[in-house]
Amino acid sequence: MTKKELAELLKYSSPREIYVITHYGVLIRLFCPVKVRVLQDIGILKRGQIVLVQEIKVTYELKTVYIINNDAYFYYYFDIIM
């Protein structure tokens, strides 16, 4: 994906919201800060800890990244708490 293609895609997204499908199949929009539970030790975060996501970004490879305490972490280390 080129930088131009990524920029075009990101025009329609916000770093302060995320869409989530619930266990009941309902699509909801969550606004930052979003509570998440740490699934495994990563950096200074410990498994089971509840933290707040300040922003949601994407990499050039379109992987979702959570900004927590001004540090970036891949989404798969966390479980969203609703």
Image (cartoon, rainbow, N blue to C red):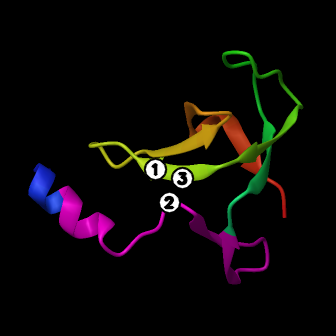
Q: Which residue is mark 3?
A: 56
Q: Does the magenta segment cover residue 1?
A: no
Q: Where's residue 69, x and y in %? A: 68, 33
Which residues lie in the magenta part? 6-30
Q: Which mark is residue 15?
A: 2
Q: Residues within 10 Å of mark 1 (few under 14, many from 20)?
A: many
Q: Earlier in the sequence, mark 1 or mark 2?
A: 2
Q: CA distance from mark 3 to mark 2?
A: 5 Å
Q: Quadrant of residue 23?
A: bottom right
Residue lying furthest front: 70
The answer to whether residue 71 shows anywhere in this view is: yes
Q: Which residue is mark 1?
A: 57
Q: Residue 45, relative to residue 48: is it above or below?
A: above
Q: CA distance from mark 1 to mark 2?
A: 6 Å
Q: Which mark is residue 37?
A: none
Labels 3 and 1 touching (C-beta < 8 A): yes
Q: Amino acid at mark 3?
A: Ile
Q: CA distance from mark 3 to mark 1?
A: 4 Å
